[in-house]
Image: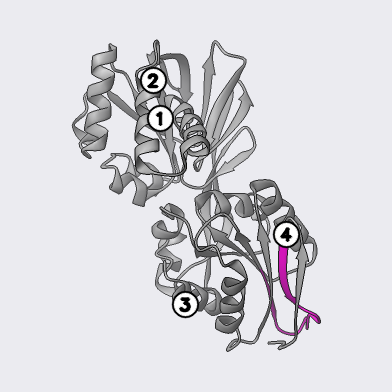
Amino acid sequence: MQALWALKNRPPQLTLEPRILNQAVAAIKIIINASVGADNKEHDCQRLAELFAASDSEISISLAHNGTQIADLARGALGEKFNIIVAGGGDGTVNAVASTLAGTSVPLGILPLGTFNYFARNLNIPLDLENAVRNIIAGHSSEVDVGDVNGRLFLNNSSLGLYPTIIREREKAYDRWGRSKIAAFLSGAYTMFRPNPFLSIHLNADRKEIACRTPLVFVNNNAYQMANYSLDGAKCLTENKLAFYVPQPESWPSLLWLAMRALCGRLREADDLRVLCAQEAWIETRHRHMRVALDGEVVRMDTPLHYRMRPGALRVIVPAGTVEKAE
């Protein structure tokens, strides 16, 4: 690997990269979310350079400060013909890079630097930095299914209704009081106690229809997350389908009881939770636009919402023993 490095300070992006890129060896682009993990990102970049030094690879490391910069860096790296593009951050960061790589032959590497790292956990990717780097250097890759709604990719889950509102209010609370569990709990409680949390929907999922009032629709594509929240629906993923969860509480007290069961990991016992498996689904509402959550990020979309599974659309570097499982 090249030993000469140029440290460039170009706000809002910090880049650490080799001066010469030898095309005879693997060229790896690493995009780090500057808002996650430790504050000393220059030290983190140097540490990554040291970890990759033992391999026959050349790396370019860039820091990004928001989702737009992450996506721009990923598109730029794709145009520069890097062999591997790595996302360093949480599930939102991984989503931003994966959205650019889906449908291409360039594999996604992951440095799980976020809080939950559901996508990495689902693929058995090591959570510590040293072993995550070793996994990328080993280079074993597999094609992974991803979800899509109105052309936007999601890796773990998507939702509409109450949950995107909870995320939005939580971010407002974080901006006002700082990131803490108390701020998250209070913002969530505020959202739950707001009047009329129900949404009228018509869901057509592979010719199965549901017309009802519901507080939310939750769409999942991650077996680890299903197990973590004690959700049925793992069979959907084995059939290359998305799992659609539609709670149907009859009143606000029953909604509160459903939320309590979710917190206690007892959703499998819920009689008022419908689960459907589908490769494709349409969701109609009375609203022309909806806030939709995608791997923890909230975007505004036109209705109807068109969900579909994209089998094998994303190539991901995974541990050798996970290759067959991911395919």
Per the rendered image, the range of residues in magenta is 14-29
**Helix or strand or loop: what does disc 1 sit on?**
helix
Q: Earlier in the sequence, mark 1 or mark 2?
A: 1
Q: What is the distance, in whole Å, between disc 3 and disc 4 at their CAs?
A: 24 Å
Give yes or no for residue 26 being in the magenta stretch. yes
Horizontal side of 85 relative to 91 (left or right) equals right
What's the mark number on residue 215? 2
Q: Earlier in the sequence, mark 3 or mark 2?
A: 3
Give, as a three-letter code, the residue at label 1: Ser
Q: Earlier in the sequence, mark 3 or mark 4?
A: 4
- Reading the image, the residue beneath label 1 is 187
Residue 17: image x %, image y %? 73, 75
Disc 2 crowd rating (10 Å Cα; few below 14, some 14-19, many 20+) is many
**Helix or strand or loop: what does disc 2 sit on?**
loop
Q: Is residue 320 visible?
A: yes
Q: What is the distance, in whole Å, between disc 3 and disc 1 at their CAs?
A: 36 Å
Residue 316: image x %, image y %? 55, 62
Residue 253: image x %, image y %? 24, 15
What's the mark number on residue 13? 4
- Reading the image, the residue beneath label 3 is 130
Q: Marks 3 and 1: which is nearer the front?
A: 1
Residue at image coords 47%, 42%? 178
Disc 4 crowd rating (10 Å Cα; few below 14, some 14-19, many 20+) is some
Q: In this rendering, is residue 202 above or below 125? A: above
Q: What is the distance, in whole Å, between disc 2 and disc 4 at their CAs?
A: 40 Å
